[in-house]
Image (cartoon, helix red, strand yellow):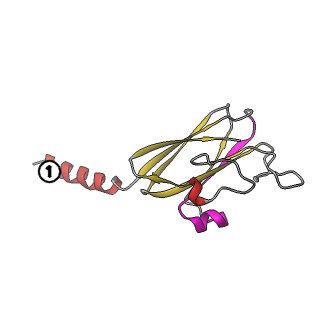
Amino acid sequence: MKRLPLCVFGLIWTLGHAHAADLNVTFTDIEEAKGELLIAVFDSADAWDNDKPLVASAHIPVTGTTVQHTFKDLKPSTYAVSVIRDANGNQRLDTNFIGMPIEQYGYSQNPPLKMRKATFEETRFELNDAIQAITIKLR
């Protein structure tokens, strides 16, 4: 009889967490262990184009040429991730006089380089599993 309440609690806990997923992101090709990664997770083209509202974000120190971070308990959906390696701590992507980035950056799906910010369509992916992993190559 004592097992029944425990089983009910376990079922309720499982159902409550059945709709959450973890996203493990590995960032590669980091030029030097300096600064921090500014990571943003978006769930729509509108949010992507306007840099808000974010589903999740993180500022993590760069400790090597490869860094990992996990976003926990995201709902299964379509997402896109962008990252900047903020080498000088000013909390933004620095550019040269013609607008070309001088700090490293990257996007989910690693779309080909163009003379513009990648679009949500180029960077989006489906998060369905309880745990999913993606890799973003910094440029």
Queried whether the magenta region covers residue 51, the answer comes back as yes
Q: Residue at x 59, y 55 (%)?
A: 122
Residue 30's image quarter? top right
Residue type at mark 1 is Leu
Q: Residue furthest left?
A: 1
**What percent of the width, then of the height, locates residue 34?**
75, 36
| Quadrant housing residue 53 | bottom right
Can you identify the residue that label 1 sits on?
4
Residue 92 locus on image (x, y percent): 76, 53
Vertical order, 15 against 53 (above or below): above
Q: Number of numbered discs present? A: 1
Viewed as shown, does residue 6 lie left or right of 61?
left
Label 1 packing within 10 angstroms: few (<14), some (14-19), many (20+): few
Q: Is residue 12 left or right of residue 25?
A: left
Q: Tag 1, which secondary structure?
A: helix
Q: Residue at x 23, y 52 (%)?
A: 11
Q: What residue is drawn where x is 81% and y is 44%?
A: 88
Looking at the rendering, the stretch of residues picked out in magenta corresponds to 34-53
Depth check: 89 or 112 in front? 112
Q: Is residue 4 left or right of residue 83?
A: left
Q: Quadrant of residue 76?
A: bottom left
Residue sitting farthest toward the right:
97
Q: In the rendered image, which quarter contains the C terminus?
A: top right
On whether residue 75 falls in the magenta region, the answer is no
48 relative to 70, above or below? below
User: Where in the figure is residue 116, as x and y percent of width and height?
Assistant: 73, 57
Task: Give percent across and percent down for residue 89.
Answer: 78, 47
Residue 45, placed above or below residue 73: below
